[in-house]
Structures are given as structure tokens and as C-alpha cells.
Amino acid sequence: MEKVVQFLKDAEVYYLATVDGNQPRVRPFGTAHIFEGRLYIQTGKVKAVSKQISANPKVEICAFKNGEWIRISGELVEDDRVEARQSMLDAYPSLKGMYSADDGNTQVFYFKNATAVISAFAHGPETIKF
């Protein structure tokens, strides 16, 4: 999983795909953090993406860097503990201007039953399950 998180951090921006009814939705994200051995991402409860994940927790992430791309599919599970939210904010201090661990808006999710595939035209795919 560390390789997956490092890929996302090196790419700086990844794209998270959700479903809104029967319409796919894709938007840029930037948080990727390991807490208690799980891959976490962060958003705000007031955002449409939060509602989409609640309705259907199956998501996919895609990122590209240096001729390689990664696709991560799995289910997101909300972790409503203040410790999980604070850990994310400590890892991304720039978020502290918009979020706080106890603001009622900050939301963190971890991946469950996830599969990451790193691919490139120059080499075959590498699959990582977590």
C-alpha cells in the first residue's frame, strides 16, 4: 500500500470517480494518507461527492505520472473518529485553513477491498491488493 500512496503523492493530483444516480462524476483530489494501516482520503460533508459516496461507496481513482498510471478501485468507508480526521489534517497542514477535526464538515474515508493497478506502455501491469 505504501507504493500506492507514494504514487498518488508524487502525482500530486488524482481523479476520483463516483456515481450520481446514473451519471458518472469525476473530480480532482489531492489527499492520500496512511492511518492505522489503511489508505485514507478526505473531503467535506457539504460537498456533492460526500453524498455520492454515501449513496454508493464504490469508487475509482486514476492518476498519471512519468509515463505510468494507476487505477484504484474499491469501497470507501467513513471513519468518523476525530483521531482519523486530525491525522489527515496533520499530514496536510494546508487544509487547516478550510477544515478542522471537529468542525462537523471534515470527513475522511478509508479504502476497503481495494485493488490498485500500476500500468505503463513500457511494462506490464502491477497489481496491489489492500
Image (cartoon, rainbow, N blue to C red):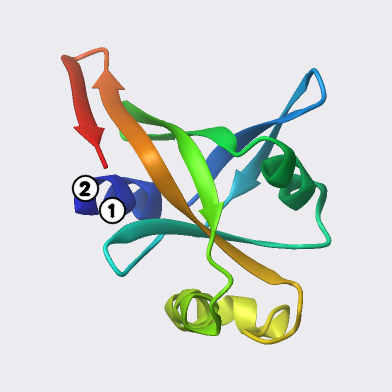
Eyeballing the image, is 109 above or below 26? below
Q: Residues within 10 Å of mark 2 (few under 14, many from 20)?
A: few
Q: Identify the residue position indicated by label 2 in the image.
A: 3
Looking at the rendered structure, the secondary structure element under dot 1 is helix
Place of residue 128 in the rendered image (x, y in percent of width and height, measured from the top left): 22, 34
In the image, 77 versus 100, the foreground residue is 77
| Circle on res. 6 | 1
Numbered-mark total: 2
The image shows residue 41 at horizontal and vertical percentages of 51, 57
Identify the secondary structure beneath mark 2. helix
Percent of width and height locating residue 111? 43, 48
Cβ atoms at labels 1 and 2 below 8 Å apart: yes
* Residue 87 sits in quarter: bottom left
Above or below, 7 relative to 101:
above
26 horizontally vs 92: left or right:
right
Q: Residue at x 60, y 39 (%)?
A: 57
Q: Residue at x 24, y 35 (%)?
A: 129
Say what amino acid the circle numbered 1 marks: Gln
Residue 95, picture quadrant: bottom right
Amino acid on which the number 2 mark rests in the picture? Lys
Visible in this render: residue 3?
yes
Would you call the spot at circle 1 few (<14 residues within 10 Å), some (14-19), or many (20 or more)?
few
Q: CA distance from mark 1 to mark 2?
A: 5 Å
Image location of residue 33, percent across then percent down: 39, 63
The quarter of the rendered structure image containing the C terminus is top left
